[in-house]
Image (cartoon, rainbow, N blue to C red):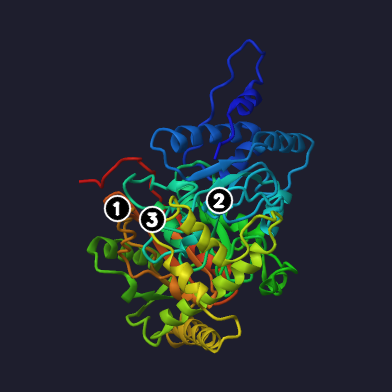
Amino acid sequence: MQKFSLLAASALLAIAPAAAMPPPLPEVEGKDAATLQDEMTARRINSDVIAATYLERIRRLDDDGPKLDAVIATSPDATSRAFDLDQERRAGRVRGALHGIPILLKDNIEAAGPLPTTAGSLALKDNVTGRDAPLVARLRDAGAIIFGKTNLSEWANIRSDNSTSGWSAVGGLTKNPHSLDRNSCGSSSGSAAAVAASLAPLAIGTETDGSITCPAGVNGIVGFKPTVGLVSRTHIVPISHSQDTAGPMTLTVRDAAAVMNVIAGSDPADPATAEADARKTDYAAALSPGALKGKRIGVMRDRVGDRADVAALFDAALRQMAGLGATLVEIPDSRKGSEGLGAAEFEILLTELKADMAAWLGTLPNANAPKSLADLIAFNKANPAELKWFDQSLFEMAENKGGLDSPAYLAAREKAARLAGPEGIDRLLKTHEVDLLVGVTNGPAWISDLARGDSYNSPGTSQLPAVAGYPHLTVPMGAVEGLPIGISFIGTKWSDADVLAAGYAYEQASKKRVTPTYRTGVAP
């Protein structure tokens, strides 16, 4: 897909006389949105220059150079939108913390304009819906610049159980900017890699189980999966209405909180969000460097994995939290009682995929668009490029499932909700008398191998909060062999502000985010 030319961006930079060279682009690598906002407030930089700078970085790092393949397409009106927002600022109107800040969208989120929403599939390469997802409309109203679409694991990693995360037929394979031969995890692969590489300061990802937190962790950024029902899912390509949610992927917790302030809220078209307006709060105002003082933190020791270097990072993070006034409570058996959860979740995801995908496809304005999962399966069989690297076994299994009234599905929903929520996270919090849970988000990124698929190397912490629909935040914890590792903060339903505040306190004390090197191969 053709990305937006930089000609318009360069023209906007010509603020000197026409015969003079435009000023050099500013440095934005590693700058978070709050810092850019401060610089715009101080009149040291304009939004149009910021937009042009990120477009140049996309050209240099994503299209050329290391060729990250994190960004599928950029919005053709990005710089003109930035110019308009600069004019508003000069007139005394600043809409908030995101005014004039570029943000990328995972390409399963609809946005009005000429860019299609593809989910990475050639079946949707021309899927221009002309619709803003409600979360996108909220971002526009807040003054954010919808900058473009990011690559993803095709169909958000629900097509095959032998897939390679970060690959899509539309976007190719997203590379990890910390080591180009390593995987970027998924399914919000491009969103994570793009923010890590400073192709934009902000991105939106989506998660069903681990699809925000894993890519954020292995790319060394912040990722927040909010309580399911806090953010609308309308006009987002679905997998599971029980578990799907969108969330921010950013360089800092402060930026994640600022994005949540904008995108959280009720949507009449999404019944899960009925309580969102009553539950949301000012997430940025709730942040405090002292948020861990007096908190009891449950340590999920059995989810660290078997790597001594990762365990050492985790232990150092725990000492840091203890130094901030937290009381640490060891939980050696956080998996106890969750037997059967994986099978129940699998039944839910496949059954809801079949129903939810048909419902979403049925809303597409293009009369020639596929209408069902069966249509997608047939398309893939007829297009060898789709099945070049892995099959569609999960699609085919889902197609054979019953409806949302099937006894197997209803039993799985009851069991999964109970095991992950009341008998899972809530039980751990109550039994050990702790406020939050912490664990290791990920092991180091594995080598990408399209022929063999993924090779996850960490027990992970995503399943319980994903199935329960509870908040899960990952924050950089450092790196092993130059590959980032994240630490997870998990709470009960609607405790999003507390989870963000705890992660912020740790982040401010530790400052463990590492800068990408765009090398190939791990450090000696």
Picture layout, residue 343 above or below residue 523? below
**x 40%, y 70%: residue:** 461
* Mark 3 or 2, nearer chain start: 2
Q: In front: mark 1 or mark 3?
A: 1
Foreground pick, 343 / 327 = 343
Residue 218: mark: 3
Q: Amino acid at mark 1?
A: Ile
Q: According to the image, label 1 marks what residue?
A: 447
**x 54%, y 23%: residue:** 24
Q: CA distance from mark 2 to mark 1?
A: 24 Å
Mark 2 neighbour density, 10 Å: few (under 14) some (14–19) many (20 or more)? many
Foreground pick, 312 / 259 = 259
Q: According to the image, label 2 marks what residue?
A: 203
Foreground pick, 104 / 502 = 104
Q: Is residue 75 left or right of residue 520?
A: right
- The answer to whether residue 44 is visible is no
Q: Amino acid at mark 3?
A: Val
Query: Which secondary structure lies at badge 2?
Result: strand
Q: CA distance from mark 3 to mark 2?
A: 16 Å
**x 57%, y 76%: residue:** 493
Q: Residue reaching furthest right? A: 91
Mark 3 neighbour density, 10 Å: few (under 14) some (14–19) many (20 or more)? many
Q: Amino acid at mark 2?
A: Ala
